[in-house]
Image (cartoon, rainbow, N blue to C red):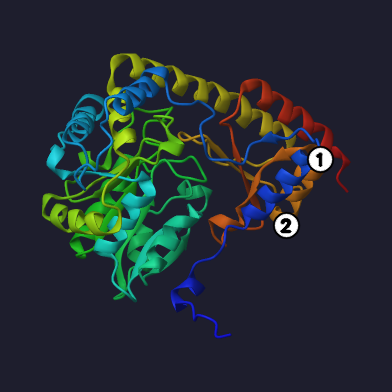
Amino acid sequence: MMENKLASRLENIAPFHVMELMKMAAELEHEGRHLIHMGIGEPDFTAPQIVIDAAAKAMADGRLQYTSALGLPALREAISAHYAEKFGVYVPASRIVVTAGASAALLLACAALVEPGKEVLMPDPCYPCNRHFVAAFEGRASLVASGPEHRFQLTDQMVNEHWTHKTSGVLLASPSNPTGTSIEAGELAKIIANVKARGGFTIVDEIYQGLSYDATPFSALSLDDDVVIINSFSKYFNMTGWRLGWIVVPERLVPSLEKLAQNLFICASSVAQHAALACFSNEALTIYEARKLEFKRRRDFIVPALRELGFGIPVMPDGAFYVYADCSSFTDDADAFAKQVLREAGVVIVPGQDFGPFTATSYVRLSYANSMENLQEAVARLKTFLPARP
């Protein structure tokens, strides 16, 4: 029997190594083990009741048809108003495209901007799908080692040092997955201006933007109108499985993204879009802000607790719900360490290898999107486990 030949681009897309860990965790739970999950990048809160009620009403009213590929006009207007009220930035609704999650938003951006053979600069460590999205359109992610002295983020100097004739743009995330760190506004402004002067594009992933704890959150749109912004209803708005996000682009790019969206996705879920309108109600926003304070409370517990256990946390995470912790005082193999923590302590954490080679063997990511009681139990289990290590 003749086998189908797979496209060569698949060779540039690595699997999620952490999935092996997740399979191990599932097997242990099937055997009756109680595990504490600190590996999943997902809020433990679900959508507020007002959002669920809005979805139910949309279904009951039969508002289930395709929407415009750009999204419901009312939702685009609501997102525009949110930028004005929350961040003091005027973003016309005409520049906002509603997408099937932030993943679809980034796919549209890469489809429109990444040329085959061209490179996109991004920090190492970074969210693995970012480089895989670039690879899917036959571009190349140029990973730049970004250590704690730079908050695990690209700097303007790094852009200067690594920009070549093959470079077409930069892809940043602020706050970042896996590090929970943000780029300071002045540094980000320099990067954007530098890339623009070189004729390149800047894409900024702001899906954790609403979960910023130590400073007033801002959008890169306040720095330059030409920046491409990715955002989502998954994190701050607690709608992970609803698969709804958006992208903000310069006006001139909207027709191109509309054409791509029409062909690739038709539209985002109409039910999710109608439900998301309720996210911007005063009732929902009050709930989201209270949940944000709870995330901060958890961060303020888990970071000093992990440091006390011997993990190195050189940079306080200022956003998202992750701690990127140096485990090199315990091991020279973060992957093996994470598996041992899973088996012996019953705590699920993620090794650094999925996030790039620079911190692959020395760092682990822990998510504090779990109850305070579970976080306290996780620390107690780790405290019992770590001294027993040879």
The image quarter in which residue 282 lies: top left
Quarter assignment of residue 256: bottom left
Position above or below: 115 against 154: below
Where residue 158 appears, x then y in whole percent? 38, 60
Q: What residue type is labelled 2?
A: Asp
Of the residues shown, which amino acid type is indicated by label 1?
A: Glu
Residue 144 shows in this picture: yes
Q: Closer to the camera, 191 or 242?
A: 242
Q: Name the residue under label 2.
A: 333
Residue 116: percent from left, percent from top: 32, 74
Disc on the earlier residue, 1 or 2:
1
Residue 155 in the image, given as x and y percentages of width and height:
37, 53
Q: Is residue 302 left or right of residue 100?
A: right
Q: What is the C-alpha distance between the residues marked 1 and 2?
A: 27 Å
Q: Is residue 124 visible?
A: no
Secondary structure beneath label 1: loop
Answer above or below: position of 338 versus 295. Answer: below
* Disc on res. 31: 1
Between residues 123 and 377, which one lies in front from this camera angle? 377
Residue displayed at 23% across by 50% down: 227
Q: Which residue is drawn at 43% across and 25% down?
A: 47
